Image (cartoon, helix red, strand yellow):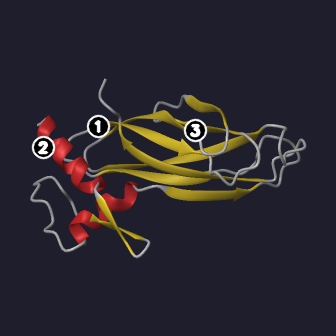
Amino acid sequence: MFRQHLTLRMAALFSLVVSSVVVPHFMAGAQTPSVPNQINPNILRQNEPRILTVNCTSTGQNCDRTASLTIYNNFDAPGEFVLYLTAPASHCSNVNYFITDRNGQRRETGFLTPGRREMLYIGRLDARSRYTVQIGAIGQTGGCNSGRLGSWSVEAFGDLMPPG
């Protein structure tokens, strides 16, 4: 079971770069992997990294707006999922990201410097289900931030929790 799960996950993650466009391996002329619990290669790709950008209307470091991202479990079995959050290299100050997991518990990163990534636990997702997570941000004075977080971005994607 674990080997089949790992094979499916690896098939979804392998990609080729062709003319600056990322193309999943199975769409680049190779055959679609023969895995019985795969819904559809295009749906499976929905957990790829997304860049989310938010403009704040608040006056302090706590942004009053959030971004949302839907995480998909495309497997025939339930699984534990995590959310990877990366502060874009273009950020000019540090940002703390936070979410509410499936159990209603607040989870947050530390203040991430540009380019740094952290993983937050989302929780157990039922087989063939989805969960939409709201991502919020808090700014930190320094760099271009003089005391007010005006906007923020994050690269975010969900995945199965790594073993161990």
Up the image or down, 105 lies above or below 20; here it is: above
Pick whichever, 43 or 86, lies toward us. 86
Q: How far apart are marks 2 and 1 (CA)?
A: 14 Å
Instruction: Please give the residue where the numbered disc 3 appears in the rendered image.
Output: 99
The quadrant in which the C terminus is found is top left
The quadrant in which the N terminus is found is top left
Q: How far apart are marks 2 and 3 (CA)?
A: 31 Å
Q: Do the residues labelled 3 and 1 touch (CB within 8 Å)?
A: no
Instruction: Please give the residue where the numbered disc 1 appears in the rendered image.
Output: 79
Q: Give the percent coordinates (x, y) of residue 57.
A: 82, 55
Up the image or down, 134 lies above or below 28; here it is: above
Q: Is residue 19 left or right of 59 when viewed as pictured?
A: left
Which of marks 3 and 2 precedes in the sequence?
2
Which image quarter: residue 123? top left
Which residue does the image show at 57% across and 30% down from the upper left?
Answer: 107
Which residue does the image show at 26% across and 50% down from the upper left?
Answer: 128
Which residue does the image show at 48% across and 42% down from the upper left?
Answer: 84
From the image, state whether disc 2 or disc 3 is nearer to you: 2
Give the number of the disc on residue 4. Answer: 2
Pick whichever, 16 or 69, lies toward us. 16
Task: Assign a secondary structure to mark 2.
Answer: helix
Q: How far apart are marks 3 and 1 (CA)?
A: 19 Å
Q: Do the residues labelled 2 and 3 touch (CB within 8 Å)?
A: no
